Image (tube, rainbow, N blue to C red):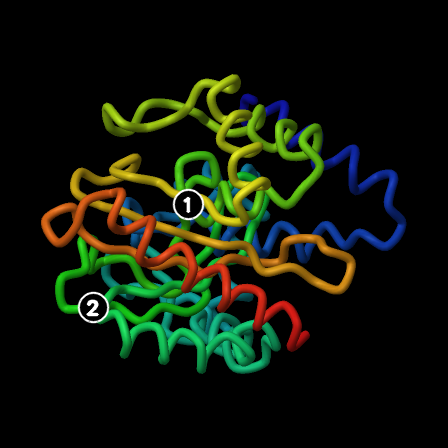
């Protein structure tokens, strides 16, 4: 979808929702314009990334700077995020009941397995890390709380999708930017459907070297009182430590039991 089409779709959605405050949406579009590839932006770049005219971009950048969420370099006139933007994420982690319920299970699994243990939640076509205990031999040390990975090629993602009705899960997969990240990535829809059916039947999902060479992951979904998936817990290890078959045998029962316990405690 092009930027113009996406912008038009947002405008139409706002027009049909009397409660929709477009200025709030636009402010968040400005904040989301910044990332690792573009840590600092000029006003022109902010306008382009947030799909605003320059005058609107200037007003939003000025307001966010006054509120402490952006900083403007007095010499270059470029903007960057401030540490205050972490506040919302911190509040989520401290206030979220799922994170609070899962935390003792993550610690126990980490201590008993000496592996990396993660709690993720779904967000459209991605899963987001909301709690993480990394082992010494973690394969991706740069992955932190708030990090995102594709739902279609991750064990947590497939575990979560496996607890949805197949048609609903496939609709999400069809929206994904599916591609072979490694030679082992499962990305074709027919093969992904098979993975969903398998995950639903056995209660857990695996992803072996689908995102990184040498990475093995086993995950189980956490569900709410209605049986809808709200997150997943996974154990990640390295191919140099064990085979995929050994990881499945050792860690599938652990994540399944933990996911069930966290689900019951809701």
Say which residue appears at 47% left-offset and 21% top-offset. Answer: 191
Q: In this image, 100 relative to 144: left or right? A: right
Q: Which residue lies furthest to the left in this view?
A: 240
Q: Is residue 37 above or below residue 89?
A: above
Label 2 – label 1 distance at C-alpha: 18 Å
Percent coordinates x, y for residue 95 in the rendering: 58, 80
| Image position of 32 with respect to 49: above or below | below
Q: Note whether 5 is above or below 48 in the view shown.
A: above
Q: Which of the two residues, 36 or 79, is positioned nearer the viewer here?
A: 36
Percent across and percent down for residue 181 are 29, 29
- Tell me the number on the disc at residue 115: none
Residue denoted by label 2? 135
Q: Name the residue under label 1.
A: 155
Snapshot quadrant of residue 112: bottom left
Q: How many labels does the image show?
A: 2
Q: Going 46% across and 55% down the picture, which residue do you hit?
A: 128
Q: What residue do we see at 27% from left, 79% from top?
A: 111
Q: Which quarter of the image is occupied by the C terminus?
A: bottom right
- Sequence-earlier tag: 2 or 1: 2
- Residue 43 lies, in percent from the top left, at 41, 48
* Contact between labelled residues 1 and 2, with CB atoms less than 8 Å apart: no
Side (left or right) of 101 relative to 206: right
Element on which disc 1 rests: helix
Residue 5 visible to an observer of this rendering: yes
Q: Quadrant of residue 185?
A: top left
């Amino acid at each position: 979808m092009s930027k113009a089409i996406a912008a038009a779709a947002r405008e139409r959605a706002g027009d049909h929702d009397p409660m929709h405050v477009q200025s709030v949406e636009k402010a968040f579009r400005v904040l989301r314009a910044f990332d690792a590839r573009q840590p600092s932006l000029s006003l022109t770049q902010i306008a382009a990334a947030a799909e605003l005219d320059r005058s609107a971009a200037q007003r939003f950048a000025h307001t966010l700077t006054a509120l402490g969420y952006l900083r403007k370099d007095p010499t270059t006139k470029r903007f960057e995020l401030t540490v205050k933007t972490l506040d919302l994420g911190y509040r989520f982690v401290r206030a979220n009941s799922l994170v609070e319920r899962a935390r003792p299970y993550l610690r126990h699994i980490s201590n008993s397995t000496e592996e990396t243990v993660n709690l993720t939640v779904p967000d459209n076509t991605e899963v987001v890390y909301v709690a993480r205990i990394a082992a010494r031999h973690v394969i991706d040390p740069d992955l932190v709380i708030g990090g995102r990975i594709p739902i279609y090629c991750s064990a947590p993602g497939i575990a979560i999708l496996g607890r949805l009705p197949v048609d609903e899960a496939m609709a999400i997969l069809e929206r994904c930017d599916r591609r072979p990240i490694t030679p082992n990535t499962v990305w074709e829809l027919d093969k992904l459907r098979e993975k969903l059916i398998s995950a639903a039947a056995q209660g857990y999902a695996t992803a072996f070297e689908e995102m990184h060479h040498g990475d093995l992951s086993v995950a189980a979904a956490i569900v709410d009182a209605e049986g809808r998936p709200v997150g997943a817990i996974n154990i990640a290890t390295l191919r140099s430590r064990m085979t995929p078959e050994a990881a499945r045998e050792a860690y599938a029962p652990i994540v399944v039991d933990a996911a069930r316990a966290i689900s019951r405690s809701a």
